[in-house]
Amino acid sequence: MSTLTEKIREAAQKVLAEGLAEVVLGYTQGSLPYRNRVTAVNTPEETSRLIWPSFGVLNPANVLHKLKGKKVALISPGCVSRAVVVLCQEGQVKRDEVYLLGVPCPGMLDPSKVRDLGKKILRVEDDFKEKVLVVTSEGEKIVAREELLRQNCLECRHPTPPVYDELLEGEARKPSPSPYQKVEEIEAREVSARWQWFQEAVVSRCIRCYACRNACPLCYCPTCFVDDSRPQWVGKTRDPVDTALYHLVRAYHLAGRCVDCGSCEAACPMDIPLRLLTKKLEKEALSAFSFESGLDPEAPLLLTTFREEDPEDFMITQELKALGKI
Amino acid sequence: MYYILKREDLRPWLEAINREYTLFVPRTRDGFGPYEGELYLEGKTRLSAKEFFLPWREPLLVYEARPGALPKVVEGPAEQRVVFGVRPCDARGVILIEKVFSPDPFWQKRREATSLIGLVCEEPGTECFCWAMGVNPFSGEGLDLVLVPHEEVYLVKVITEAGKKLLSLSRAAEGGEEAFLSREKEFKAKFPVSPALEKLREKDLMTIYEAPFWEELALPCLNCGACTFLCPTCYCFDVQDEVVGSEGVRVRLPEACMFELYSRHASGHNPRRSPMARFRNRFMHKFKYFLDEYGEPLCVGCGRCNEECPANINLWDVVRAMSEV
Amino acid sequence: MSWEPKIIAFLCNWCSYAGADLAGVSRLRYPPSIRVVRVPCSSRVSPAMILDALKSGADGVLVSGCHPGDCHYLTGNLYARRRFYLLKKLLEFVGLDPERVQFAWVSASEGDVFAKVVTEVTDRIKALGPNTKFRKVLRVEGKS
Amino acid sequence: MVAAPKKDMIPLPAKIEKVVVETDDGLLKSFYLRLLDEEAQREFKHTPGQFAMLSVAGKGECPIGIASAPSEELIMFTVFRTGLVTDALHRLPEGAIIGLRGPLGNGYPLEKFRGKNVVLIAGGFAVTTLRATLVYLLEHREDYGEITMIYGARNPGLLLYKEELAAWRKREDMKLYLTIDREAPGWDGLVGFVPQITEQVAPSGENAVALVCGPPIMIKFTLPVLEKCGFGPEQVYLSLENRMRCGIGLCHHCNVGPFLVCRDGPVITLAALKRLPPEY
């Protein structure tokens, strides 16, 4: 049986040779054993560069805007496929201009979890099923994959791409039974404890590099609200209120859109748990509106539609009515 | 002048310094903070010591937000600060930035108010390459004192009078010159300067600029500010007027040349509109413009950009391409 | 003097603004805590506007629009309802006192409801005290 | 000649003594400034072509070319309303206080031009620093050869300094060619784009320099015309502009390759510009 990498190379060659796409976007080996890099492949010969990564932490759909006008094939685990679906729904990408090479995703590893296994990491061997062999300057370790997985992969609801043009053979991780456990841990705290968490884990750590925004496959506004000067919604310094405003509005702009690819969190040089904000909104969208993003290119978006029976008990008038005050 | 400080004498020394000055130390892997007992000495910090001189927010002027009000110049912090645990790469960064910033009063003030105690690394980190950029960590450049962890002690070299005064607060004893010099010699022999620098000096600027490799190398780049904000030598800044109610402040803050806004005119015209152009500008600045003007690259080989780049852009891929075009 | 909160009220032009007007014409009493911003529709109000109000020193924000079915633009308020629901949940999640941001339906004929809403919102914000969490403060070290 | 001014990031307060709306569309206004500090006002010495940072407290700073000549009492800037700061500036009344930092950058090397013919070519509101230059040249008329100015705007209502233009037109010791892009009622002057008019005027490149300021498209088509007229790249002077934060060579925003517009420019010869990356 061939490996996923071999299958990907073969499929990519076919796609390029048959003219199904001009470019294939995928991953290649990075500069360290625990880093992978997004790459674009233009010819069948170059496909030898492609790999199925253990550390594909950035979403290659993010690069689509740089390849406008070209037909692009994407190596697509669930979150890549879903990001493309949202881009289609929003009119950023035409469905027939992308070719989705679906991959049933076994989940990616977290580079920092692997990095912390030794002083110097020399080699990583991943079976994409159960175990990872990590060779460090101090010796070899065999670690259960589950322990090294990225948080968003542990919480993934759609490891298999919901939309694709071709689905490669492989075994996907099972959808997470408890995708909102971390969110619930925060929810269970008191208001002041939640604020303290937000300040310590998010606001005070942020250096305003916008890696989270720029890494997001769905942040494509020509001028981001942080860059507006008239009015200037967000001050540019690390002021705690400006920084909080940035993170709240950034997350909010992803409500009903975020596909939980985890690029933002992976991109953050300060290890801010950014996904908790978007995951919270994902949870609310699912529970209040039975909505999940990126499943159907023809479906309406969460915030461009409504239902008569949408919840409104959060409104003060409804609350007062229930209390018989009005 | 050379001294030897026992490892167990480090803490008492820091406490002594902290009694007389405001002492900052590397507290965690994240970065520096006021000394409160926490001490991270395992490697360099994620945020560099640059922030002591080019802070995240430097108020320049304050004013009342009403027409006709005259702004007042902000004096800046005056208390004497000591920063312990500055890595030689970071100190070298200060020297490089100073080539540009020496006339700036805000920079001068912070420089005068700050003493730096350097700490040479036990061994190079995964992404370190200071030597390749011509840094000699033992030189003490930019520092007042430099400490070298050596067996059970720290070897100390005094660089300035201020450093000598600081060291006098410790139980360090004279000696260790031989060990220090041999460690330095050993380092230099083992870690040479990158030959790429010489090639870059000789290359024609426009040849590098117009080379075809930029597009491919820049493709994965997110054009975020992670590399520039973590870089100990990136010095570009933005100026912002912040107003709340009736109070206004003009502040200076770090900015990244990777941002689209960086070069966009008020008219909307942007000379570096494409993400690739901004990517290219950052590396051209570091390894050609600055190199040509000041004779040295605007890089100290700390490797933070390589370590933290979300897209895994590797500086050496770019430098190699630039020097071999 | 007792502290009076400052509340920014984004009122939709067609219903809630008229409701506020009616409250005034009817000489209904409510606390003088609100500063009204008239908007074409409750769906015009974005999270950035709400947070900007708090950042600039408001102690609370009230957004009020037409009842479902009454929207001048047919369905603007129904889109707004979804958005505000999510915003409220997000603000709660990060520990911003949820009572500081309130949403209401007030029609042009509900002057009394408007007065009661403002009274209730004011009371709740008074109980919380001034907005210190999300108010921007300019820091100047070594101010001369 | 001129003592190096103190270069830091602290603006000096200046009073707007007079505001003149220059164009029919109201988007260009001239601001006549006087520094509040009398000594600073006396010491303010600039060379035509230099710029200054104007600041409106609460909004920010932006670089604007100095439109007045060194001999003129008030420091004048003609400002196009386009961004945050210029918009705020346009709203200020006479008597308001703003901040001024400068003069900054390098002006035209007018000493070097002595004895030469000078051709000034301006398009749109980029004429401002060339106005300063022309006033200077006319004040030192005997030091220079022929003086020719070609100035074009989209329509007559967009020409700046109309009274001065009328006066210059009457002078016999200089030639002024005014042109507008398209025929307009009441306009009896030249019609055509600046490059075309330059071609018709055909100034000689012999013992001459050309100072060209205008929108990129005008510059693009004017340069070949000048070349045909015999102007070598060392004889053509341009003025660059880029986004700036400090104006004093620190912030690096305005770099065109290794060239910092604030520190090494804004005035640059075509020869020097050709050696730089096209980032302007």
Image (cartoon, coloured by chain):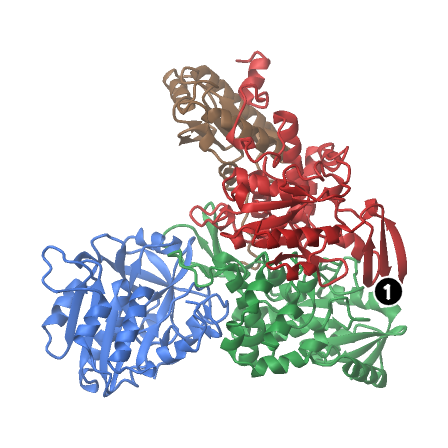
Chain colours: A red, B green, C brown, D blue
Decide if residue A321 is in sight here. yes
In this view of the protein, which residue sits in the foreground, A158 or C31?
Answer: A158
The residue at the point 35 percent across, 81 percent down is D2
Estimate how packed mark 1 is, as few (under 14), some (14 to 19) or many (20 or more) residues with alpha carbons within 10 Å.
few
In this view of the protein, which residue sits in the foreground, D266 or A275?
Answer: A275
Q: Is residue A324 above or below residue C31?
A: above
| x, y percent for residue B248 | 47, 52
- Helix, strand or loop under label 1: loop
| x, y percent for residue D260 | 45, 72
The answer to which image quadrant residue D148 occupies is bottom left
Q: Amino acid at mark 1?
A: Ser
| x, y percent for residue C88 | 59, 31
The residue at the point 61 percent across, 26 percent down is A289
The answer to which image quadrant residue B52 occupies is bottom right
In this view of the protein, which residue sits in the foreground, D189 or B172?
Answer: D189
Name the residue furthest front: A18
Name the residue furthest top: A324
| x, y percent for residue B165 | 74, 76
For disc 1, the marked residue is A137
